[in-house]
Amino acid sequence: MEQLTELVALCKERGSILVFDAAYAPFIRSPGVPKTIYEIPGADEVAIEVNSFSKYAGFTGVRLGWTVVPAALKFADGTLVQQDFNRVMATAFNGASNIVQNGGLACLDPEGLAEIDVLIDYYMENARILRETMEGLGYDAYGGIDAPYIFVKLPESMGGSWDAFQTILETTQVVTIPGAGFGPGGEGYLRLSAFAPRESVVEACSRLAKALAPVEA
Amino acid sequence: MKLSIATALLAVSSVGAFAPMQQPRFFTATTSLAATTGVARNPNFAKLAGGYLFPEIGRRRNAYLEENPEMASRLISLGIGDTTQPIPDHILSGLVKGASRLGAKETYSGYGDGQGQIDLREKIAEVLYKDLVKPSDVFVSDGAKCDIMRLQQMFGANTISAVQDPSYPVYVDTSVMMGQTGDINKDTSQYGNIVYMPCTSENGFFPDYAAMPRADVVYLCSPKYVKDDAWLSLIVGGNVVHTGMPCVVRSNCFLSPSLSTATPPVLPPQWSN
């Protein structure tokens, strides 16, 4: 919260626009972690927020998201950013599918929100299993709390993260993502997604536990 | 003629974003083809170092399965964050209702508002934002990724983007496509004219924008990486120490290894190709 407040203030001071990607916001359950940038006072003057129903309503293939462009956000010449974004949407987009928007309305009914909670519980339990498995092997594992991904620090003996990805694929038939795929700063890490079915997660953990050498603390 | 082009296209398989570039497999539409159009390739696309990350993962998986077809039934994906659980009943009923409405004269609808149905915009503002934003601020779309590209189209070519490193590849790749960036530096795997904000243990895994040059647009993923029940463990000299500081880190990117501006990232040797 404090860090975001400082970032919003700095963006305002420097005249930058902050694009805040909140697509995983419902996975945040720790108190005090903002779920939207607009919880930060003054963010409506600097921030755009992009968001999506994909990950928590199972809409990855259905396709439904949204972007918030506050009326208070302006370009250097005073033009409303909202005005130009509206022009993009009006010119190059005819709106989301009317079928799908009805699905979005259902998501936001009390019944839909309760169903989303159950789905998030399911995926976060997967995340817990993955994190605890990797930690049990002595690996330093990040994430899995407030986020449906685990980031695992790789021992140097496994080589680069693309090498580790390949080794794990060949020895366990588990597909992961090498951290380097997210930029040079991700090298040395491996990402595990918690979105697989439970039985697959359990089986993957069993194979990883057998295949990966425990890391000595 | 058509056949030869199709064959050439089939032979193309790009390497991934930030993937080791073992061999150049890019499609170069030059004199090697029997026929070309007179349209020059957008030079910004030529700057892209490889294919999008997730298809590259799929390509490697498929290559493995081609060599080891007996393993197909054993394959488990913990890769791309793709949902696997069915859509629950109430939400599904909304989709079904939306489809059914198209089958009756009274409820049929054609083109809708480009910004989305007003009732959905209102509900998003009310239920998800507790009225922190107005319905008129909400633009409903076909997904966050698509909107990131639309934002880039709005910002245009003359803006400088800042991204977390590591981060969701879409912010960087769309910046390149729009022509905001220079070429990639093969040593650092970074594009010119993008501000890469390291997410390191030294800065608590939150980007230190103040320490970086100004950018026009700063991309930040919703903070959601915490460790040890919201208490951060820092890796210092190979040991895990508890700082007693709550740690929020980003989503799609994750914690980066301890690199700082003074310590260039250690890249696998293939990267120097």
Image (spheres, grey):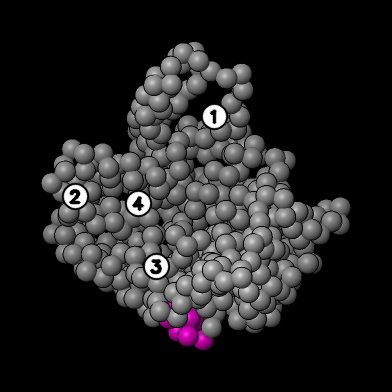
Question: Mark 2 or 4, which is nearer the eye?
Answer: 2
The image shows residue B23 at horizontal and vertical percentages of 36, 26
Identified at 28% across, 67% down, the residue is A197
Instruction: Magenta stretch: give its range.
Output: A110-116
Distance, label 1 to label 4, CA atoms, is: 25 Å
Q: Quadrant of the N terminus of chain A?
A: bottom right
Residue A7 in view: no
Dot label at residue B72: 2
Q: Quadrant of residue A20?
A: bottom right
**Location of mark 4 (residue):** A177
Dot label at residue B238: none
Residue A80 in view: yes
Question: Dot 3 falls on which chain?
Answer: A
**Location of mark 3 (residue):** A148
Q: Residues within 10 Å of mark 1 (few under 14, many from 20)?
A: some
Three-letter code for the amino acid on which mark 1 is drawn: Ala
> Can marks 3 and 4 be said to lie on one chain?
yes
Distance, label 2 to label 1, CA atoms, is: 35 Å
